[in-house]
Amino acid sequence: MTALTIIVEFETNEGSEEEFLTRIREHARKTLEEEPGCLRFEVIKPIKRDGTPIPNKVMVNELYANEAAVTAHESNPRLAKVREANGPLLKSSRLILAQAVDGRAADEGLRPQELNASNDD
């Protein structure tokens, strides 16, 4: 099966970014611990070309092994609590569900050109 990616763009309310970052990092950590189908959960801070952080903008990039893993994530009882707690901190959010256009399955591993010292076990 093909791996699926979830990318979410968040805009926090003025003065709420640090609290949101703390909460979303904890959510990422717990998701990786609780959900074996979650292969990656990165919290990302958008920046300008000169490296300056863009205020009140946060993104997440999640990789799931397959559709069943996404469904398991969506039905995790903790997710509703996270959304409720984060709601007052957010001005907006936009979720993008995607899959790799090369169609490579999550269990196919790395290609030879992707191998380097940073991904050695």
Image (cartoon, grey):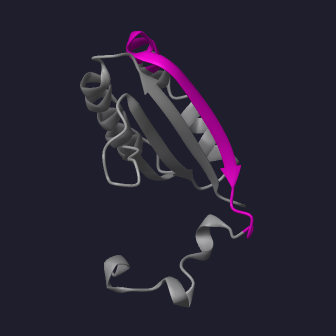
Inspect the magenta stretch and tell me whether residue 91 lies in it.
yes
At 43% across and 48% down in the image, what residue appears? 41
On the question of residue 5 being in view, the answer is yes
The correct choice, above or below, for 65 with respect to 34 in the image is: below
Residue at the farthest bottom position: 112
The correct choice, above or below, for 14 with respect to 42 in the image is: above
In front here: 4 or 86? 86
Which quadrant is the C terminus positioned in? Answer: bottom left
In front here: 110 or 33? 110
Which quadrant is the N terminus positioned in? Answer: bottom right
The image quadrant that residue 85 belongs to is: top left
At 52% across and 35% down in the image, what residue appears? 9
On the question of residue 71 being in view, the answer is no
Residue 66 lies, in percent from the top left, at 65, 53
**Residue stretch rendered in magenta on the structure:** 83-103
Residue at the farthest top position: 88
Badge count: 0
Residue 59 lies, in percent from the top left, at 45, 40
In front here: 43 or 109? 43
The image quadrant that residue 73 belongs to is: top right
Inspect the magenta stretch and tell me whether residue 56 lies in it.
no
Residue 96 lies, in percent from the top left, at 65, 39
In front here: 13 or 29? 13
Residue 108 lies, in percent from the top left, at 62, 75
The correct choice, above or below, for 70 with respect to 103 in the image is: above
On the picture, is 49 further left or further right than 19?
right
